[in-house]
Image (cartoon, coloured by chain):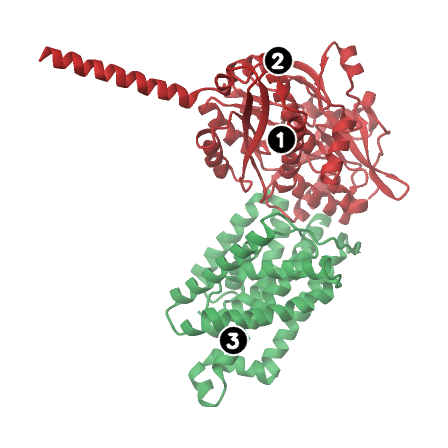
Chain colours: A green, B red
Amino acid sequence: MDAILRSLIDGLLLGFVYGIAAMGLTLIWGVMNVINLSHGSLISLGMFSLYFLFTGLGIHPYLAVVITAILGLLLGIVIYAIAVHRIINAPHLSTLLATYSVNMIILGIGTAILSTSPYNVPFDLGSIKVATSVVPTTRLIAAIVAMLVAGGLYLFLQYSRLGRYIRAVTDNREAAEIVGIPSAQILAFSFGLGTMLAAISGGLIATFFPFTILAGGAYELKSFVIGVLGGLGNPVGSLFGGLILGAIEGLVPLAMPTTWTPVLEFVLFVLILLVRPTGLFGGSE
Amino acid sequence: MRRKLYLLLGLLLVASMVLAGCGNKATSTPAANAGGGGKEVTVTIGFTESQTGKYNVDSTAQTQGLKLWMEQINAAGGIKLSDGTVVKFKAVSYDDESKADKVQQLYTRLATEDKADFLISPYSSGLTSAAAVVSEQYGKIMLATGAASDSIFKKGYERVYQLYTPASHYLTGAVDILKANAPDVKKLAFVYENSKFSTAVVTAAKEYAAKQGYDIVLFEGYDKDTTDFGAFINKIQDSGAEAVLGGGHFQDGETFARQIAEKKLPIKFLALLVAPPNPKFAELGDAALGVVGPSQWEAAAAYTPEAAKKAGLTWFGPSSAEFAKAYKEKYNDDAGYHAAGGYAAGVVLQKAIIDADSVDPDKVKAALDKMDILTFFGHIKFDTGDAHGLQIGHEMVYIQWQKEGDKLVKQVVWPKEGATAKLLYPLTH
């Protein structure tokens, strides 16, 4: 029983961070029907942003997460303006290729400058005991930050004027434009929000795991699984999807070799697509 | 008609002789080039370096060691052969990105386009295995440093020579340490990287431990890019293991040790491959304390001309202190065993050329086959039987990170005769 609890706590704490990463992907899909294939490399940029802000400028890692979030928002708006805006109404293949190209540009420049060697953020806050599990404080804080970000995003989308604009554009872009909502700016801002979430998750992960410029790719894959679990286009569902994935990653190794975990995750991915394509918590098909 | 035929045949004969002559010239050995006494011959040494990718840290150290040797030997005027020929060295190298397919492509280029006379292996068993296929195909002598796998030397290769203690003996000493220092430990867990090298090492160590009467409660590999060891740490705790052995390469080993300390895993002994002996391991701070690691070389290990005399071996090359000092001066960094391995590859090649009194590959090969020397790196002797080229002279030393005041220092704890400190036991995370 102790073992199950320990593994579950570990998995769930990580699941919150996965959830934030997936939220960014699913928000962009929900608002503008774009599958952002540069999501993984944007997570990596979040990791490196935190690394350089901390090791280079000596900024505290959690303040660096805030700065990384702002930089992510701005970068997302720039990427939208340059690569996505002109083809936003084109078939899906065009936006897939455009975001994939952005991905390759980021990875190419990143590899040339940073190499593919691993980086570590030398930051340690010790550990604390949660139930029977000893948990590194950085992971606990990451989970709390992820919860705050998810809650903040929910409140923002539900109650702020900008959030309502985003939901209006999501529901019916043309109707939103008729009532005077500047859809181009809202789309750019939404892409920025999605990128910001990717950058935050990258920054949080960097506080406890080593990473390379290619590391975001694995989290992008997880984001797809989580997106489908929680319902593509349903950002809050993503958080629950993240928790489910985290729980699977925590519990599966108790019963079988750890290398089986991704196999089970992707089996689940295919099953959900077949049986309930709107996701466990509903979303746009 | 017949006269024309004879003329044609004659022309063909002359043409074929000219072509054959050209061919000989193209494949002529440096020794043939060096024929006239007093000449200077530049021998090309080809290798790849993992400037990027996961082997970057270890590979860079290895290359730096090799380059230091090359600079020193060239600065000292090269190797003088008995016919007055002076042999100097130049390096040709590329970035293999820590990838086996790149290695095959680049070693083919080194052997054909760059016409390297001798090859040094890339870092790691996996990459060396890929390089060995190519070097053997082109008949080049390759000194394999940074590669401990036994299997490379069971493929019938004739020109690949290993400097490291092979994997089958890499971690068995950790079991001996436990036996000598921790009679209360009965349950062992092996958690290792799913790579050729690590799997070979832990499989051999597991068999050895089982023979010694230990209970192996966990034996599981992790993927090479693993950054989250949470699941493994939970499994170790559930298994009731008192000692953990395993690891893989630097990055995963460092992360594994860090997360074990963060989770305060209640184990008494931790021995990991590759990572602990690297001076950068100390950056972990208290998480490094008490971690044991096998090392191919340590500056403190007692390999001296006197030890060579006692063992009835020929001593060759600089002392450990001389190498460590020169390395520190050049790179402003402490030399680890990867760096020493790179330097030792140069020293062994140097000795083989001196013994062969030639740079002719066949003569150098014969000299390597006969080699039985003690160097700063340890005893060097190659198998000349079924596992041709396998290292059979060299032995591992085990280090442990301990504290001197507030400072983390590396101490040799095994074998006893070379120990600089007693084992810190049990772990105090």
Residue B297 lies, with reference to residue B287, above or below; the image says above
Q: Which residue is mark 1?
A: B146
**Marks 3/1: CA–CA distance:** 51 Å
Q: Position of residue B38 (x, y in %)?
A: 57, 17
The chain identifier of the residue carrying mark 2 reads: B
In the image, B10: left or right of B286? left
Q: Nearer the viewer, mark 3 or mark 1?
A: 1
The chain identifier of the residue carrying mark 1 reads: B
The residue that appears at 69% across and 45% down in the rendered structure is B255
In this orientation, which residue lies closer to the viewer: B24 or A60? Answer: B24
Circle 2 residues within 10 Å: few <14, some 14–19, many ≥20: some
Residue B370 lies, with reference to residue B170, above or below; the image says above
Q: Position of residue B37 (x, y in %)?
A: 55, 14
Secondary structure of residue under mark 2: helix
Q: Are marks 3 and 1 on the same chain?
A: no
Q: Position of residue B317 (x, y in %)?
A: 71, 21
Q: Are marks 3 and 1 in contact (CB under 8 Å)?
A: no
The residue that appears at 67% across and 40% down in the rendered structure is B250
Secondary structure of residue under mark 3: helix
In this orientation, which residue lies closer to the viewer: A179 or A214? Answer: A214
The residue that appears at 62% across and 33% down in the rendered structure is B198
The label on residue B355 is: 2
Q: Quadrant of residue A21?
A: bottom right
**Marks 2/1: CA–CA distance:** 24 Å
